[in-house]
Each structure stands twice: as structure tokens, then as C-alpha cells.
Image: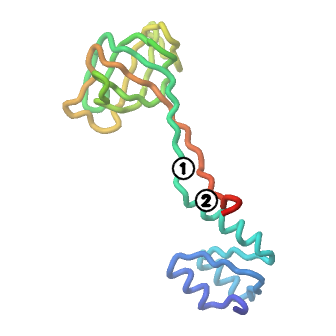
Amino acid sequence: VGDLNESDVLLAKSSKAIIAAFKINIPNPVAKLVQFSNVSVLSADVVYDLVNGIKEMMRELLPPEITRIDIGKLNVLATFKIEQTRMIVGGRITDGKIKKGAKIDVKRKGVVVLSGKITQLQHNKKDMPEVASGNECGIMVAPSVPAGDKKIEVGDDIYIYEEEVKKKESPEKKEGL
């Protein structure tokens, strides 16, 4: 009730809160304190604008939605170099395509034994951005965590995927409820 004052700003700063103000005045000294304190003030003269502003701020707090998009599969035919931080293997692409920079899951008998990322991709000893199904290629994999005793073996299947990150939408109130 009343104009925004210094104690409102100091309380918001100490509690890391946002001030939502409806039809109030912000005096110049308080506006300067708001700017100096890095406190966010959401002010509106129409209640719907204030509610929409709060919804938008809450949407920013929601974690993003990550969607996995499978793009290919490779059957491992040979292993060339197996280390803790990188592995070099060769194989045949049995489905889809392989892209440099894509993420992978290595499955053995249907169980994921290793995850990582493709850091290098070669076809006919040439670096390639992607290689299509039916071709053989060599890949360098960086495990997402140090491999330890886990390693890629001949006969493993490598599933290649990308992740699409979308901001979540705030749930809207359903009509009739």
C-alpha cells in the first residue's frame, strides 16, 4: 500500500526477491536505489499486465525440456585406440547417419555401457562432418566421464543422437476448472 520505499527495496535485495508493483509510484531516490541494488521491479497499471509479467518471470525459472533425437546407429567392427579420455573405433553405419559432435550411447547386449561424444569422424581417411548409412567410418569418442575399465569392443552398437533444448511453457489454467 502506498509508494515504493527504501525498506521495500532493501528487503527485496536481502531476500533476493522481485518487487511486483500494481498502480504505485516509484519516487526518484527509490528508483536510484533500485538500480544500484540490482533489484527487479515489475510494475503495471493493469492487473493483467502484472499477472502476465509474473508468469513470464516464472517461465524463466523452469528448467528447459531436453528432447533426444536419434539420428543413427553404428556397429563396431574394429578398435584402434582405447584410452581413458578418448577411444578410436571403426564400424559400419547400419541406420541413419553419423555427425561429428553428436552424442552417443554404446550398448552391449542391449545395455548402455558408455556414453560420450563424437569428436572426430573420418570416411576414407578424410575428416567428414557426417557420414550416411551403409558406409564404413572411423570415429574418435570422448567419454562423458573417464572410462575406467569400460571400453568399446568389437560387436558393440553405438547409437548416435542429438539433443534439442526447448524452454518449457508455463502451464496455463485450464478452462472450466
Residue 60 location, quadrant: bottom right
Q: Quadrant of the C terminus?
A: bottom right
Binning the other alpha carbons within 10 Å of mark 1 as few (below 14), some (14 to 19) or many (20 upward) gives some
Q: In this view, does 109 lie above or below 5?
A: above
Could you tell me the amino acid type at mark 1?
Pro
Quadrant in the rendering for residue 140: top left
Q: Name the residue under label 1.
A: 64
Q: What residue type is labelled 2?
A: Arg
What numbered label is drawn on residue 59? 2
Left or right: where does residue 77 sit relative to residue 54? left
**63 lies above or below 66:** below
Residue found farthest to the front: 176
Q: Residues within 10 Å of mark 2 (few under 14, many from 20)?
A: some
Image x and y of residue 81, in percent: 27, 19
Q: What colour scheme has been applied to the protein in the rendered image? A: rainbow
Q: Are marks 1 and 2 in contact (CB under 8 Å)?
A: no
In front here: 92 or 169?
Answer: 169
> Would residue 101 appear left or right of 7 to someone viewing this image?
left
Q: Which of the numbered marks, if any, corresponds to residue 7?
A: none
N-terminal-most mark, 1 or 2: 2
